[in-house]
Each structure stands twice: as structure tokens, then as C-alpha cells.
Amino acid sequence: MIKRTLYFGNPAYLSLSNAQLVLRLPEVVKNDTLPSVVKKQFERTIPIEDIGVIILDNKQITITQGLLEKLMENNCAVIICDSTRMPAGLLLPLDVHSVQSERFRAQVDSSKPLRKQLWQQTVAAKIANQAAMLHRVEPAVEVSNMAAWARAVRSDDAMNLEARAAAYYWRNFFPECEGFVRHREGDAPNQLLNYGYAILRGVIARALVGSGLLPTLGIHHRNKFNAYCLADDIMEPYRPFVDEVVKHMVKKYGLLNDLTTEMKRDLLAIPTLDVKIEHKRSPLMVAASITTSSLARCYAGESKLISYPELA
């Protein structure tokens, strides 16, 4: 079943009732003079089992402990935004897999050669998807060099082909944005990419936890201040799908530095994007679970290949 991504950008009171998320307007909750029948008319309910990601983007949102507990029980990722309306925090469950401790142990005990080989696969898949996406959105741009780089990636990406491919990719991806440089603090449309990647990160982290893996312990990323190193590793081949969404948004909205509600609505479609993985079409959120399950098998010694999405 495709899980829903919910965005709350206005003051709201979120609670739990009968395994349903209940949304109420705060002014209705506080108004004791209103009959309960009238209050019910201002409620909206959503089954918890239908929810995959929730984004909280307003300082006047109240959420109950009971609802948070039920969301964690159902492996829902909760993303919290800061005063700039950008994702700043991620809440994930601690215990959603029956053999989690066994998988943690296999992950912690994984050998350095295995991790190098897994990173080689990850970088090769990322560059191949970047090449295919660049050809899709800018057909006149030569991508045979990127395809060659994807094939040439070696253990642990010793030649740093990921960086070489990224420089070429971004130099050509947004010709409508003169002098575009991909940087977290850079000019538009960097803010759209940041927001989209934050949603993607939440989806991947949720899938990792669902597969019994520890999102903190990465294959390649090792920043001691980063609690989601593994999510940042595994999301790499998925990034071009976000890039395409942003490419279309630039054509639709132009180069705006602000993130409007309409723009956020477009980016919230990322978990449901149609991708090809293991020769089948799947929503991105489902594909993420396929990828993380294959990674768990690699750690367990049952497989040597990570299943990543491919651009058709």
C-alpha cells in the first residue's frame, strides 16, 4: 500500500482517536461554548496505517504523546521544520523490526572491503542515474562521459568520480539558471533541492529503520555530528528523481527564493514518484524499502548487490 505524506503548515491540534489521526483547528478546540456536534464538523480524521511521512511546519502545532506513539509504532517519519520553514529535525521509531538486534550486529560487524564495495555500487548507480536524467531533461547535452564514469567507478570510489560527475551534471542541469552552483546556502533553486532532499532523506531513513538497520552508521558518510549517515549514503542514487521535480518547478514557477505552499505541495509528491526497480515500476517509497531490504541482506552475507532504482 502507498503511504501518504501529510503536510501541516497552519496552526493545528493533532491527536489520536481509534487508531486515527484527528486534526482540529486550535480555535475550535479552545472554544468550550461550541457543542460537541459542531466541533465534530471541524475535525478531519486519517487512518494511522495510511501515513508514511508527516511534515510539521508551524510553531503553533500541538501534537499529543499518544499520537506520536502510534505514529512510531507504524513506522512513520515525522519531519519538523524550523523558523525558516525548512526541515530541521527527523523523528523515527527505535523498534519496528523483529530481528533488529541481529541486523544491527551484522551492520556494525561489516567488513571494510564490503563497505567499500557497497559504496562503489552506490556511486555507480548515482552517476548512471544522473547521466540518464540529464539526457532526459537536456537532450542536447553530451552524457557519454558520465556513462563511462559510472562504469569506471572502483572500490570506495578511489578516483572520486562522484565529484567529477556532480560538477559536470550541475553545470548542465539548469541552463536557465545562469552560473548555477549546487550549494546548500546557494541561490534558487537550491532551496527547492534542499527541501526535496530533506523529504527524500526522511523516506530513506524510514525505510532503513523498517529494515532493521541503524541509520546513523554509514557506508561512506562518517560525520560524527550526523545522525543519519547511512540514509545520506543510500539516498544518493535517488537524488536525480528529486532533481527532475525541481527542474519542472523552475519551468512552472520561475526562480523564486521563497517556498510557497504550492511549491511545497509539488515537493510532497516525491514519495509517490514512479520509479523502476528490479525491472518493475514502484512508488519511490516502496522502492526505498526494496533498497534497504537488499542492503540488510548484504550485511547478513546473503547477497552482494544493493537494489537501486534505474531510470528507464
Image (cartoon, helix red, strand yellow):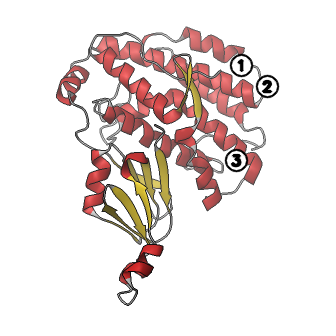
Is 94 displayed left or right of 20 in the figure? left
Residue type for callout 3? Met
On the image, the x and y values in percent for residue 22 come to 39, 64
Neighbourhood count class around disc 1 (C-alpha, 10 Å): few under 14, some 14–19, many 20 upward: many
On the image, numbered disc 1 is attached to which residue? 143
Q: Are marks 2 and 3 in contact (CB under 8 Å)?
A: no
Neighbourhood count class around disc 3 (C-alpha, 10 Å): few under 14, some 14–19, many 20 upward: some
- First in sequence: mark 1 or mark 3? 1
On the image, the x and y values in percent for residue 24 come to 42, 71
Name which residue lies at 29% across and 64% down: 64
In which quadrant is the C terminus drawn? top right
On the image, numbered disc 3 is attached to which residue? 249
Considering the numbered disc 3 on the image, is that residue within a helix, a strand or a loop? helix
Mark 1 → mark 2, Cα distance in angstroms: 9 Å
Name which residue lies at 25% across and 32% down: 97
Neighbourhood count class around disc 2 (C-alpha, 10 Å): few under 14, some 14–19, many 20 upward: few
On the image, the x and y values in percent for residue 161 come to 55, 18
On the image, numbered disc 2 is attached to which residue? 139
- First in sequence: mark 2 or mark 3? 2
3 or 300: which is nearer to us? 3
Is 5 displayed left or right of 29 in the figure? right
Considering the numbered disc 1 on the image, is that residue within a helix, a strand or a loop? loop
Say if residue 122 shows up in the picture. yes
Furthest residue to the front?
Answer: 37
Q: Taking 230 as reference, is 41 above or below it?
A: below
Say if residue 184 shows up in the picture. no
305 or 254: which is nearer to us? 305
Q: Are marks 1 and 3 in contact (CB under 8 Å)?
A: no
